[in-house]
Image (cartoon, grey):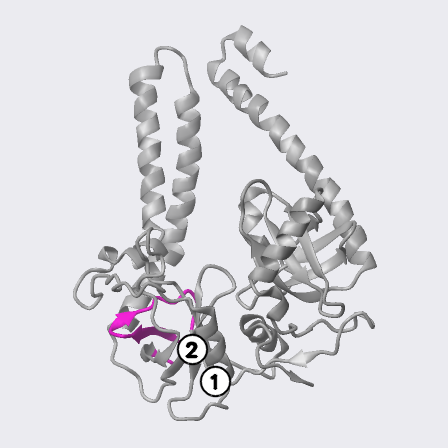
Amino acid sequence: MVGPPADEAGIGWLNDIAVFCVGGGPVAAIVGVAALVNYRRMRRALSAHPWIACSAVAIPPRQGNPRTALRHPQTGDVIPLSVRTLPQRYHLASPDPGGVLWWCGDARTGGVLAQPGGQHLLWARRHRTGRTRRRDVLTADRRGLLNRPQPWQSQAGVGDQLIEGREPDLSYAAMTETARRQAIGDEHGTAPRREPDIRAVPWWRVPALLEISYVWPAVVNAAFTCAMVLTWWLLAKDQDVHVPLILAALSGFNALRFGRRMMTQGVPGVKALVQAARAPVPVPVPVRYVLLPGLDDGLLLVLFAAHGGPEDLPEAAMEVNPPPGPPKHPRRGIPSAVGTVDLHGWLDAGPTVVPWIDGGPLWPRHAYEAVNLNDRRDRECFAALVGGAGAEAT
């Protein structure tokens, strides 16, 4: 409606915007209709079935939508599923580090998948072809799905369809076993990639801190904005073409957004981390650690008392960024799963702590937090991480 009148009136910039709308409008409409259809399916499944925690494995992708296989905790049946979602959400179909996914639905008609906690929901149903389903079941068997322990059912009040709940063993010995089994370190034994020593160089020379500070995306978007404005001025101004200006406006918005994060969160947070990393080691601190994969792409550093036995429970935890490894060896530089750690910084009000392992820092994503296993959320978080290993019946 806008494009032809704008073209006849000679309003070039409005005509350029109409071109973007013609391309993006149908795509947005199709995605919106598909989202509404999935919403109705999810609502029916969630109202008719309980949540069940299932052992799960991701099927190595070939083409199309991501696939996963679940093992029902009561019947032992393997349920191969194909997830219907956008590419930006494919990672949500992978099991959590403990190999667990929540399932709510029927294997024949489809249902809802979610990682433990149910924050992000995905619609999944069995694949159309029986050949693919059989191949996925065989792949899940080869990946050890049938040998995994039954996960702890943390959901309450879901009827008689669930097996008896199990409390996970969160002792130092159980977490050590889980961390070594998951093997997040560099399996090839390559030498770690050392970053510049923060005690000797400015913080912007450390790639991990530069990423945390939001400086790089702000600078890139600002540079692209300037490049588009210059392109329009030199090449498109006389031809009444305004596409470069539209791209410049979009990039400028992103530059302002990242610049605001940089000034309010990124740079102040990085300076606090640098100050903590250069501080002496506080005493006393928990110095034994177990390093587990986090619930996303990070790592969870679980801390235990310096002097204790295998039955000790965790005292604190920190989510940290993995060391940046090269593309061919992304795990290079990740410390061993179990060992000792020095905590630099302050543990008083508003704790700011940087852990040092093997002479190098692991930059935290969140503050140092004491663990309270009497809190249901803390128990469920750690239960998802250990995946029911060593669980004891309540």
Q: Which residue is mark 1?
A: 172
Q: Position of residue 38 (x, y in %)?
A: 72, 44
Between 171 and 224, the one lying in front of the other is 171
Residue range corresponding to the magenta coloring: 346-367
Please state, as top left, top right, bottom left or bottom right, where the N terminus lies in the image. Answer: top right
Mark sitting earlier along the chain (1/2): 1
| Side of 335 relative to 113 (left or right) | left
Please state, as top left, top right, bottom left or bottom right, where the C terminus lies in the image. Answer: bottom right
Q: Residue at x 69, y 50 (%)?
A: 124
Query: The disc labelled 1 sits on which kind of residue?
Result: Tyr
Q: Which residue is mark 2?
A: 290
Residue 223 placement: quadrant: top left
Q: Position of residue 322 (x, y in %)?
A: 37, 63
| Side of 103 relative to 115 (left or right) | right
Q: Is residue 284 visible?
A: yes
Query: The disc labelled 2 sits on which kind of residue?
Result: Val
